[in-house]
Image: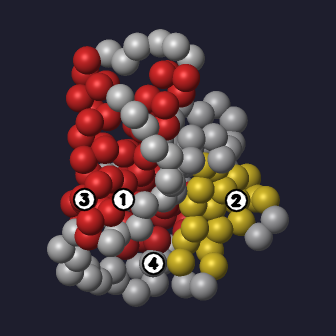
Amino acid sequence: MLDIQIILDRLEKVRKSGKGYMACCPVHEDRSPSMGIEEKDNKILCHCFGCGAKGIEIVAALNLPPDVLFHDPLERIEDKHHQLNKKSDWDDFMLMMASDTLKQGKLLRHKDYKEVKQSLARREQRRLFGLPILSNMEIVL
């Protein structure tokens, strides 16, 4: 479906920048353009330098299907560890935040402690299945 104009029409403060465009990110409350959009190799690449959002998150915030980012339709590759991999970024974020909180001498809230325990459990599952683990920080609770 690949039409960059569909995305640009739904964004605010769009301006030309180099080979692509800059615009306000729809994922977070952006007041000045912090998101880059570029068409390259039959794909539309989007990245917010403010919040770190990438293409799929951005088009979801615009109520568009992921197919608008690609020339060829998306094919779902069967991945028996899909749900486990899906949480990987969240787990790394939770572990990093918990580590920073503990280093500052603060205590974790009970709700956060439960999330961290779940993140550690999923990380261990990824390790057992031989799936990639993005960071190697170890946290002792």
Q: Residue at x 64, y 31 (%)?
A: 31
* Label of residue 125 in the image: 3
Q: Position of residue 47 (x, y in %)?
A: 59, 56
Front of the two marks 3 and 4: 3
Foreground: disc 4 or disc 1: 4
Mark 3 or mark 4: whose residue is earlier in sequence: 4
Q: The residue under label 1 is which amino acid type?
A: Leu
Above or below: residue 105 compared with residue 4: above
Q: Nearer the viewer, residue 99 or 20?
A: 99
Residue underneath mark 4: 70
Amino acid found under the numbered disc labelled 4: Phe
Measure how far apart labels 2 and 3 are at the Cα level: 40 Å
- Tell me which numbered mark, 2 or 3, is placed earlier along the sequence: 2
Name the residue type under label 2: Tyr
Q: Secondary structure at mark 4?
A: loop
**Which residue of the protein is positioned furthest toward the front in this rendering?**
140
Q: CA distance from mark 1 to mark 3?
A: 33 Å
Describe the element under mark 3 as helix, strand or loop: helix
Q: Is 112 positioned to the left or the right of 137 in the image?
A: left
> Label 1 near label 2: C-beta < 8 Å?
no
Q: Is residue 67 above or below residue 89?
A: below
Q: Which of the labelled discs sits on residue 21, or is there none?
A: 2
